[in-house]
Amino acid sequence: MSTELLDAVRLHLAEHGGEPTPARVAAALRARGRLLGDAEVLDVVAALRSELVGAGPLEPLLADPDVTDILVNAPDEVWIDRGHGLERSSVRFTDTSAVRRLAQRLATTAGRRLDDARPWVDARLPDGTRLHAVLPPVVVGSPCLSLRVVRARAFTLPELVAAGTLDAETAALLRDILNARLSFMISGGTGTGKTTLLSCLLGLVEPDARIVLAEDSAELRPDHPHVVRLETRPANQEGAGRVTLRDLVRQALRMRPDRLVVGEVRGAEVTDLLAALNTGHEGGCGTVHANAAGDVPARLEALGSTAGLDRAALHSQLAAALSVVVHLERDAAGRRRLAEIHVLRRGDDGLVVTVPALVRQAGDGFDRGPGWDRLARLCAAGAP
């Protein structure tokens, strides 16, 4: 089907109004001197509707339960991730204009603006899918789309064990950490499964507990009967109405949380979270970007500096607030795996460091590290 034909029908419908029904499409084709059979008319109808509703050519990929990420680099370069690394899809767009139209329509669906004046957008679609799009000239060549698919339900621990993310023994340890109400952070790079694991663990929290989530984009979907979800909001076109993650953490503290959760610690809100965990809010948790578990104290230190918290004050709060770091990684095959679990210890210089308690072996399984005894004591002391 030629781009010229679609453009001609699209222009006719825009001039005369109406949905792309078979009758209207057939009339548009006749008006352009084109006579097609029923099958060809229905093909045109399907192509036009894919541009007007849903995610267009990407809709089958979004419907695939195994797909976690969809990346559009160009009309003929659509990549997907099914949990085993990136692979090229057979999906194609007709041209760069089609990619741009889809990006702008999805942005509008999310209530955001995407045009030459605002050439990028980061938003959540109504179904929970995370959208990021960039238009030329900020990106060279074609508009780029990134879609992070949020599962309708959280994974269970047995499913993560079956997928090879962790083993049964480590799954039991994570249950112990939850039951002991230890505060923890899940660290890792982009796409390592931090949100997936956190959603899974929150589903294991005692059912009579009240979980309050504070997120930039509402991605956590814990299978739990008592969850309150708070989401940030950008400023409107007049620059007013912005709600930050720090605002949400402060509001969450007034909502009687049994478990305070920050979806991703990425700025000044780290100070409010640490303050909360130091004032009786046990079992709080969140995620943070870091290359290794041992880098988390330095990462939190850097984030705390954005709120004016000096190094000594940050480490004093961190020592009393956080107990465990669970680190995730992708292996050479692109599989998401739990790599290590560390406990935190304050040194003689007052600075907090992490100590390995469990470290994945080169093959399968885990080795216990020097922090194992401390982790076992923490779990035993907090066990109900």
Image (cartoon, rainbow, N blue to C red):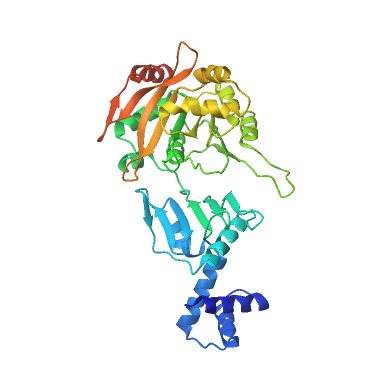
Could one spot residue 27 in this view of the protein? yes
Classify residue 383 by image quadrant: top left
Q: Quadrant of the C terminus?
A: top left
Instruction: Say if 291 sits above or below 52 in the image.
Output: above
Q: Nearer the viewer, residue 208 or 67?
A: 67
Query: Residue at point 50% right, 73% down?
Result: 46
Query: Residue at point 57% right, 82% down?
Result: 23
Residue extending farthest to the top is 348
Residue 217 at what x, y percent from top left? Answer: 56, 44
Instruction: Say if 320 sits above or below 25 in the image.
Output: above
Residue 83 at what x, y percent from top left? Answer: 37, 48
Q: Is residue 220 left or right of residue 334?
A: right
Residue extending farthest to the left is 363
Instruction: Tell me how many marks there are.
Output: 0
Residue 112 at what x, y percent from top left? Answer: 64, 53
Could one spot residue 178 in this view of the protein? no
Q: Is residue 109 left or right of residue 188?
A: right
Residue 272 at what x, y percent from top left? Answer: 60, 27
Query: Residue at point 65% right, 44% down?
Result: 234
Q: Nearer the viewer, residue 254 or 316?
A: 316
Classify residue 314 by image quadrant: top right
